[in-house]
Image (tube, rainbow, N blue to C red):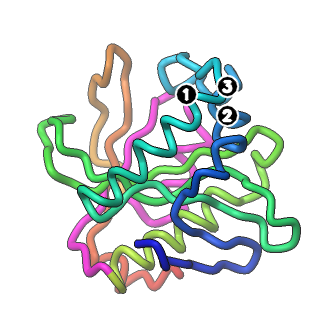
Amino acid sequence: MDNLMIETDRFLIRPLIAEDATGIFELDSNPKVHVHLGKKPIQTLEEAENTVKFIQKQYEDLGIGRWAIIDKETNDFIGWTGFKYITSPVNGHVNYYDIGYRLIERYWGKGIATETALASLKYAFEVLNLNIVYGICDVKNTASKNTLLKCGLKLKETFNYEGSPHYWFYITGEEWVANKLA
């Protein structure tokens, strides 16, 4: 996992490192970022450092975790993309790969989530040889819904997640290959 590097036209995607904590703090302390995420922004840099350590532990324990998005021109931390291996039941599923992304607010609306999620899915199906990937988003989060659809995921159903309605999406490896999205 340490030497993972995915490249898109504009970005490098790599494992989170300790130095990313400042970017994680900017990202996750913004209440606007958390509107569809339970409205629990972090308050301190120490919480951001702990987030990085938690994700690094996922790399060790599960072989996967969210990855940093780095702007190739500026070397700036943009947010994260990639997978989380879900080991607790969600919508009747357990032990599955969830695609996700979260961007610092000033980078919203520039196609970054779609570009990096597509690169992550390509890695999932062409390198990791996963059979299926799932994605969820709050039904009010139109931007995230649109990103998942642009990445070829299919909306299967709506379900209750942590007290609010969410969409449940999926894409299989066979569908990925058939669609040749990235």
Q: Earlier in the sequence, mark 1 or mark 3?
A: 3
**Residue, x 67% and y 34% (percent of image)?**
25
The disc at residue 92 is none
Pick the quarter of the image with the N terminus: bottom left
Q: Which is more toward the observer, 60 or 28?
A: 60
Q: Earlier in the sequence, mark 2 or mark 1?
A: 2
**Residue, x 53% and y 70% (percent of image)?**
118
Question: Could you tell me if the residues under marks 3 and 2 are in contact, i.e. CB atoms within 8 Å?
Answer: yes
Structural crowding at the residue carrying mark 3, measured as other residues with C-alpha within 10 Å and reported as few (<14), some (14–19) or many (≥20): many
Asked whether residue 8 is drawn in magenta, I would say: no
Asked whether residue 144 is drawn in magenta, I would say: yes
Marks 1/3: CA distance? 10 Å
**Residue, x 69% and y 59% (percent of image)?**
112
Give the labeled residue for mark 3: 29
Marks 2/1: CA distance? 8 Å
| Residue 32, above or below 157 | above
Residue type at mark 1 is: Glu
Question: Could you tell me if the residues under marks 2 and 1 are in contact, i.e. CB atoms within 8 Å?
Answer: yes
Structural crowding at the residue carrying mark 2, measured as other residues with C-alpha within 10 Å and reported as few (<14), some (14–19) or many (≥20): many
Q: Position of residue 157 (x, y in %)?
A: 28, 40
Residue segment shown in magenta: 128-153
Secondary element under disc 3, as helix, strand or loop, is: loop
Give the labeled residue for mark 2: 25
- 158 lies left or right of 117: left
Question: Could you tell me if the residues under marks 1 and 3 are in contact, i.e. CB atoms within 8 Å?
Answer: no
| Residue 74, above or below 54 | below
Q: Which is more toward the observer, 154 or 115?
A: 115
Secondary element under disc 1, as helix, strand or loop, is: helix
